Image (cartoon, rainbow, N blue to C red):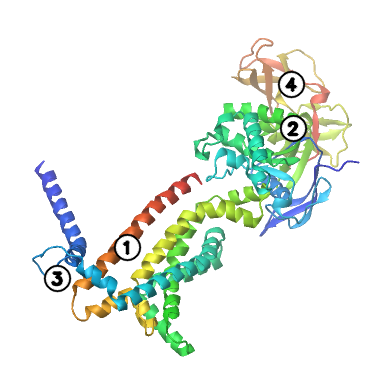
Amino acid sequence: MNHGLLARILYATYLAALFLFLFAPIAVVVVFAFDAKGIATPPFEGPTLRWFRAVLADPVLQQAAANSAKIAVITVILCILIGTPAAFAIARLNGRGVRAFALVISMPLMLPTLLVGVTLMAMFSSLGVGLSMWTATVGHVLVTLPFLVFTLSARITSIDPQLAEAAANLGATPAQTFRRITLPLIGSALACAGLLVLGWSIDEFTVSFFNMGGGSTLPMAIWGQMRGGVSPTVNAISTIMLGLTVFIILVVHRLGNIAALGGKTG
Amino acid sequence: MQSPAVRVIGLTRRFDSTLALNDVSLDVAEGRFVSLLGPSGCGKTTLMRIIAGLDRQTSGRVEIAGVDHSASAPNRRPVGLVFQRYALFPHLTVAQNVGFSMQIRGEPQAAIARRVTELLRLIQLDDYGPRSIDQLSGGQAQRVALARILASDPPVLLLDEPMSALDLKLRQSMQIELRQLQRQLGKTFIFVTHDQHEAMVMSDEIVLMNAGRIVQRGSPEEVYFSPNSLFSARFLGDANLIPGTFQNGVLAGDGVICRPAAAAAMTRAEGWACIRPESVTISLASGEHGPNMVHARISETIFQGASRRYHALAGSHRFLVDQPTTQGTPLGVGDEVRLSWPDSAVAMIDEPTHG
């Protein structure tokens, strides 16, 4: 009896410590983004939206946000175009070649992003390609492709290959089969994977840092502002990005549930 | 002359080192219910998939209604396939599944709706149109798969073990329903199964396959009572197989002489006689002795409902005998009996008795 009680107290303490460790820094950032005082130290001196207004009015941050958004959207589109056929190949074909291909695709997941960023920059410079938003986008595609390919191939594997055969047998051309059967069945997984890539691209720092050239992305701009200490505007941007990320996670989670449901019946 | 609904000529399919189909030729006449019967791995499913264009032959030809379809895409072949696991589209409703082929052909919505209603009535799922696929039971899903194929109105239907997921009772009633539906529609049905009872219940004709080849074809009665090989004899049901030597048109086994109704041409001096258990008449022993007659002692009796099975020892042979339970008096273990059978029940099998 005592033993059980002790275990429960220990367990609760452990959980509390874990949550504190995980979320206290985030809570501090969010709380001080709304603090009128302007220095991220207690006590809290009344709520304000001043810092958020400052962020939204800052031309440097505006430019960086626009860059981030452009890079993220282009990365998602390229990942879908490149990754969808790769996902089908991994899910539907088998053999040593396909396994090697899957391994190569997954490489950027296992390599440190620092290494990816630096080597990519070295490659661009040896090829004489000037660094720009586009070279950074190439880096983003490289690093995010595995997320898309493996999320999607998992879904494709769960779809009965006989569905496509049945559609063909009922007179559908390969294009009609893809549009009417395959695409609706992988749609939610595709959206899910696309959002993961979007979120990752918006947060990405290292690869952008080495390959962006003159411009900067939102995380780079934040890093730039941090050199003068943690300003309340940094807290405000971080809060905005946190909100965006949580939103994406929620949507992905919701889509993931739908995809799982579809997988069961498919 | 009318060309057959389906004709395959010299069809061979090689997977790496194995031959799934080995030089198979087959004509299926229009309007027939033909079963491709055989153990798993015999090539029956491969043959069906090649006819549908879902697999490609290594060599050989496929003709459907007189037109060469050896190389055409699956969506251009006038055959409908009912898949073993139905392959209903999970993101579409029952009605959308049934109407899929008409939608693909771009038919007017009103015509699609009318035909879907008609077909749902035919399969007795009138009110199921708006339902989702995962609300269907196995038997219902199977009927929807059938309706979906019928909507595309192919002259030939291929059915890949469509009953294997159903329980026995449902399977039996579906067998009759499917047979009646085939007669009513007048379409050619090619039914793939490994279940010999199912094949016999439903078919006009059985095509028995083994190891990538067609072993025997004929009506269920022909294949059952006149097997041309040990494989046919054993696959279609229980058989008394008696090895012996051929002399003057009869087969002399160990203490048993089997005389067929018509002498068959044999290629070697030894072979087998096949007699089905229900062809044998059992009676209490008398002194007679002769061809198609043997003395035996009962070693086992098994009550099977409609019939009673006896195991009877005659020399080195153990005979299986089925007698209707409503005829004669039951015999017991140790009874001395006489087994006899008509000439017409003897099928000669031209295969070596050793190895």
Tell me the tag on residue A40: 3
Chain hosting mark 3: A
Q: Secondary structure beneath disc 2?
A: helix
Residue position marked by numbered label 4 in the rendering: B280
Looking at the rendered structure, whether the residues under marks 2 and 1 are on a common chain is answered as: no
Chain hosting mark 4: B
N-terminal-most mark, 2 or 4? 2
Q: Secondary structure beneath disc 4?
A: loop
Q: Secondary structure beneath disc 1?
A: helix
Seen in the picture, residue A231 relative to B278 is either above or below; the reply is: below
Q: What's the residue at 35%, 77% (across, down)?
A: A63
Chain hosting mark 2: B
* Callouts 2 and 1 close, C-beta under 8 Å: no
Crowd class of label 1 (few under 14; some 14 to 19; many from 20; radius 10 Å): some
* Callouts 2 and 4 close, C-beta under 8 Å: no
Residue position marked by numbered label 2 in the rendering: B185
Residue position marked by numbered label 1 in the rendering: A244
Looking at the rendered structure, whether the residues under marks 3 and 2 are on a common chain is answered as: no
Seen in the picture, residue A84 relative to B262 is either above or below; the reply is: below
Residue A39 spot, x, y in % from top left: 13, 72
Which is more toward the observer, B84 or B185?
Answer: B185
Quadrant of image for the N terminus of chain B: top right
Residue farthest top in this picture? B329
Query: Toward which corner of the image does residue B331 lie, by quadrant?
Result: top right
What separation in Å lies between label 2 and label 1 (alpha carbons)?
A: 60 Å
Q: What's the residue at 43%, 49% (across, down)?
A: A258
Chain hosting mark 1: A
Q: What's the residue at 31%, 74% (across, down)?
A: A219
Seen in the picture, residue B19 relative to B134 is either above or below; the reply is: below
